[in-house]
């Protein structure tokens, strides 16, 4: 089962092009990844064996445009399945039809994670059944408050991470929908009470929450979901089977925290497809949540956006004559499995023309009413001339609060949609980003 698990455009000077490789070698032979480009490019057949670090790819989105630009969104993992957040462009090799593509002539870029158009939806699911007393509930809420605290450290929310809160006993309830508003989340936590209900619908809660998450992957819009389940018991409702819960989370990252000694450790380990933590008591819960948050940070860092300008152009004859095979490999990868050790896609160059300046805007596609978000414009494929940006907003949902150079700040004033326009006057090119202003729903 393939799990899509544990969110880029800013100035070209920040593109991650390293002179040395950034992979921490985890291969059993202890060798580091070769960065001299000497790995066999092959001819598109069996993946050559390497003696470097182990990298497993997962393709999330592949696209190309008539200006010859090819885009790939992918995730990387090590041989243990852990997120790999230390890849650099110098570690990678792009091939077309089995031949290496020159990095200098194709303007290859591995774009930095902080400019991905990314939202991480994180659902915290809390057991409030009869096994939890008032003191333990207070400790659990204190731990969750610590996780969402705007402390500016790794214990607070990650950039563009939005949290929803759920509780469960014999039934599952959404307390508040996804938001990064700390005040709203704290207000929602104030409303949580123990239920005294004897039945615990653990598997049903996981299934229910997974259905609230909708992963989306494109170079312009990335939404990923993660679930954090906190429980001190086991499923006793028998409404939903463990197999049904596992099927529901096939494309969702799940972390579980078992508190105390009465948990079903095997079930929590199975549900926690990205990790399972334990806490001796609710007083120690914050440390477990902090460990999960650090794992989520690495998960975000394992997401990469690669793009380049293909040299291929229209071939003589029919459109199918312009089909080409794209391959991405890691130099000297010790992962010899062709299914995960390389990525292969097909593109068609029939309409390809010379690369031209293109503006992109990074930033969230939705804003909670009353909040302000930052957006960054970047012009790729523009040569050496510096970009000059102007910004404007149309529509009823939001207003332009401030702008300076490549950065704009947009404030959501009421529920609705708006269009953020960035114009690069120096290169006579522009783009528009559709933004939804949303009311946060505090459920009864």
Image: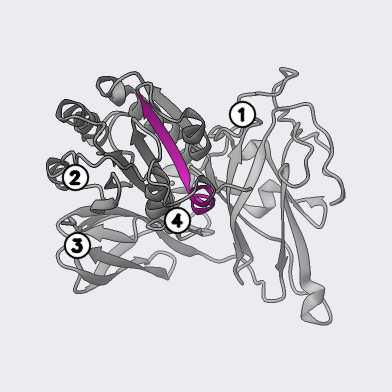
Closer to the chain start, of discs 2 and 4, is 2
Closer to the chain start, of discs 3 and 2, is 2
How far from the left and from the top, in percent, is residue 354? 63, 68
Q: CA distance from mark 4 to mark 3?
A: 21 Å
Do the residues under discs 3 and 1 have CB atoms within 8 angstroms? no
- Is disc 1 placed on a helix, strand or loop? loop
Q: Which residue is mark 3?
A: 439
Q: CA distance from mark 3 to mark 2?
A: 13 Å
Do the residues under discs 2 and 4 have CB atoms within 8 angstroms? no
Neighbor class of circle 3 (other Cα within 10 Å; few <14, some 14-19, many 20+) is some
Q: CA distance from mark 1 to mark 4?
A: 24 Å
All told, the count of numbered labels is 4
Q: CA distance from mark 3 to mark 1?
A: 42 Å
- Is disc 3 placed on a helix, strand or loop? loop
Q: Residue 23's mark?
A: 1
Q: Which of label 1 and label 4 is nearer to you?
A: 4
Q: Residue 222's mark?
A: 4
Residue 350 placement: quadrant: bottom right
Q: Which residue is mark 2?
A: 185
Whether residue 294 appears in this view of the structure is yes
Do the residues under discs 4 and 3 have CB atoms within 8 angstroms? no
Closer to the chain start, of discs 1 and 4, is 1
| Magenta highlight range | 244-259
Closer to the chain start, of discs 2 and 1, is 1
**Which residue is at the far bottom?**
318
Comparing 324 with 402, the one in front is: 324
Closer to the chain start, of discs 4 and 3, is 4
Residue 256 placement: quadrant: top left
Whether residue 118 appears in this view of the structure is no
Q: CA distance from mark 2 to mark 1?
A: 37 Å
Q: Which of label 2 and label 1 is nearer to you?
A: 2
């Amino acid at each position: 089962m393939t799990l899509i698990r544990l969110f880029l455009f800013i100035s070209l000077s920040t593109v991650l092009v390293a002179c040395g490789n950034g992979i921490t070698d985890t291969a059993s032979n202890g060798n580091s990844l070769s960065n001299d480009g000497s790995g066999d490019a092959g001819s598109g057949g069996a993946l050559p064996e390497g003696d470097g670090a182990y990298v497993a790819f997962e393709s999330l989105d592949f696209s190309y445009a008539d200006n010859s630009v090819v885009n790939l969104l992918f995730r990387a993992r090590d041989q243990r399945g852990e997120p790999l957040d230390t890849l650099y462009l110098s570690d990678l090799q792009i091939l077309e039809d089995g031949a290496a593509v020159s990095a200098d002539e194709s303007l290859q870029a591995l774009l930095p994670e902080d400019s991905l158009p990314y939202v991480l939806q994180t659902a915290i699911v809390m057991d409030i059944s009869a096994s939890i007393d008032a003191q333990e509930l207070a400790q659990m809420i204190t731990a969750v408050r610590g996780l969402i605290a705007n402390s500016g450290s790794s214990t607070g929310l990650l950039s563009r991470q939005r949290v929803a809160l759920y509780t469960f006993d014999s039934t599952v309830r959404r307390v508040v929908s996804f938001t990064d508003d700390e005040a709203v989340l704290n207000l929602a936590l104030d409303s949580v009470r123990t239920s005294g209900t004897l039945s615990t619908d653990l598997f049903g809660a996981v299934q229910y929450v997974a259905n609230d998450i909708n992963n989306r992957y494109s170079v312009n819009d990335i939404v990923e979901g993660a679930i954090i389940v906190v429980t001190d018991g086991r499923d006793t409702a028998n409404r939903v089977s463990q197999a049904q819960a596992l099927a529901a989370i096939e494309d969702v990252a799940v972390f579980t925290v078992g508190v105390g000694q009465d948990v079903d450790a095997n079930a929590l380990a199975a549900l926690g497809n990205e990790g399972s933590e334990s806490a001796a008591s609710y007083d120690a819960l914050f440390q477990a949540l902090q460990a999960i948050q650090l794992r989520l940070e690495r998960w975000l860092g394992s997401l990469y956006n690669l793009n380049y300008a293909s040299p291929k152009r229209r071939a003589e004859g029919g459109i199918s004559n312009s089909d080409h095979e794209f391959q991405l490999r890691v130099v000297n990868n010790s992962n010899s499995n062709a299914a995960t050790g390389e990525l292969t896609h097909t593109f068609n160059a029939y309409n390809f023309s010379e690369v031209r300046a293109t503006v992109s805007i990074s930033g969230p596609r939705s804003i909670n009413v009353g909040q302000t978000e930052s957006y960054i414009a970047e012009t790729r494929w523009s040569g050496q001339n510096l970009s000059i940006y102007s910004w404007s907003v149309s529509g009823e949902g939001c207003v332009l609060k401030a702008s300076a150079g490549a950065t704009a700040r947009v404030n959501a004033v009421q529920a609705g949609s708006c269009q953020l326009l960035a114009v690069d006057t120096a290169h006579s090119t522009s783009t528009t980003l559709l933004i939804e202003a949303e009311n946060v729903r505090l459920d009864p």
